[in-house]
Image (cartoon, rainbow, N blue to C red):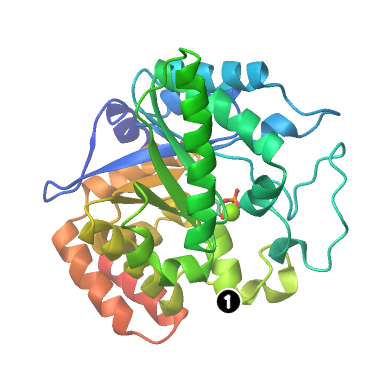
Amino acid sequence: QQAEWATLLNEKTISKDGVQVELAANIGSPNDLEGVLRHGGEGIGLYRTEFLYMGRDNLPSEEEQFTAYKTVLEGMEGKAVVIRTLDIGGDKNLPYLPLQEEMNPFLGHRAIRLCLEYQDIFRTQLRALLRASNYGNLKIMFPMIATLQEFRDAKAILSEEKENLLAKGVEVSEIEIGIMVEIPSTAVMADIFAKEVDFFSIGTNDLIQYTMAADRMNEKVSYLYQPYNPAILRLIKMVIDAAHKEKKWAGMCGEMAGDEYAVPLLLGLGLDEFSMSATSILKTRSLIKHLSVADMRTLATEALQLTTSDEILDRVKQAVH
Ligand code: PEP
Ligand code: MG
C-alpha cells in the first residue's frame, strides 16, 4: 500500500471514471510546507493564521505576517493557497488581547466578529495578505461568517486596504475571496452567498458542532458529533449545489474531508477540493483513484434518503468494500 501511495506523489487526483478533484493540505505555519510537498499536496486549502498570533506576548507586525504569507505562497510555486484570516476566540485566546469572559465562547465574540470590531488588527493582516499576493496564487477566506452583511463588511474593508495600497504604488494581484461555511445559517443561505463569494470551504469541525448543538470538545456529547448524520449531509449538498449553480467551487477543510468513509459521499455530492492534514493526502488520492464518481453519486443519493448516521455509514462501508 505504502508503495502504491509513493507512485501517486506527483500525480493529479483523478477518479476511476476520470473526474479530477484537488487534494490540498491544512497548515498552521510555514514550517508545515515541507510536509505538504513531501505528501503530494496540490495546494493549501486552509492556512490557520491564528498560530502566528499565539504563544507570544504581542501582535505580529505587518512585516512579520507578510514574510510568513510570502514564504508559503512562494513555497507552493503557483499552486492555490487559501489563507484564512484570524480565527481567534472560542477555544483560542491571546494573552495580550484581554477579551471578556464569556458564558459560551464558541457562540461568542470570535473570528470575523472580533476582526470587524478590532479593525486595526484585521486591517494589518489584510495589508500583509494583499502585499503577499504578488508571490503566488493567494485566495483569502473569512472564518465564521454567519450573515451576508458580515461578508460584505469584511470584503469592503479588504477593498479599502487594497485601494490604499494601490494609491501608494504597491502592486496587488487578483485574489479570490471566499468564506468558511461552518455556521448552519450560512449553509442554509448558500444560494444567496454563492452570488457574492468566489468560493466556499466547508468547515465541518464547527458545522457539525453548531448543527447538532454538541460541543466538539465535550466527550459527554461526542455521540452527537456525527459527520454522517443526514442533516449534515443535506447541508453539505446545499452548499456544493449552490456553489456550482453560480459556477463557483466548493471545498472542505474540516476533518471530514480526509475521512475514508466521508470521501466517497463527498465525491458523490460533487465536492471540488478536499483539504486535510498532509499525512492523509496520498491515502485519499489512492482511495479516489479506485472510486467512480458516477457510482458515488448513486451512493450519495441513496444515503440522503436514509434516516440515521449509522445507516449511512453502513451503506458507505458496503459500497466501498
Ligand atoms: C472547521 O471548523 O471545520 C475548521 C476547519 O476550522 P477550525 O477547525 O480551525 O475551527
Ligand atoms: Mg472552524
Asked whether the viewer can see residue 132, the reply is no
Q: Nearer the viewer, residue 20 or 106?
A: 106
Where is residue 48, by image quadrant? Answer: top right
Q: Callout 1, which amino acid?
A: Met
Against 139, residue 300 (above or below) is below
Please tell me which residue is depicted at 64% across the width and 46% down the height of the picture.
87
Where is residue 238, by image quadrant? Answer: bottom left
Against 177, residue 30 (above or below) is above
Q: Nearer the viewer, residue 212 or 111?
A: 111
Q: Secondary structure at mark 1?
A: helix
Q: How far from the left and from the top, in percent, is residue 251? A: 37, 50
Please tell me which residue is depicted at 65% across the width and 71% down the height of the picture.
222
How many marks can you see? Answer: 1
Asked whether the viewer can see residue 124, the reply is yes
Against 168, residue 318 (above or below) is below
Q: How far from the left and from the top, in percent, is residue 288? A: 27, 49
Q: How far from the left and from the top, in percent, is residue 285? A: 31, 42
Q: How far from the left and from the top, in percent, is residue 303? A: 31, 77
* Residue lying farthest to the left in this orientation: 17
Please tell me which residue is depicted at 84% across the width and 63% down the height of the picture.
102
Left or right: where 189 falls relative to 207: left
Please tell me which residue is depicted at 59% across the width and 15% down the height of the picture.
67
* Residue lying farthest to the front in this orientation: 167
Q: Which residue is mark 1?
A: 212
Image quadrant in which the N terminus is located: top left
Q: Nearer the viewer, residue 269 or 38?
A: 269
* Residue lying farthest to the bottom in this orientation: 307
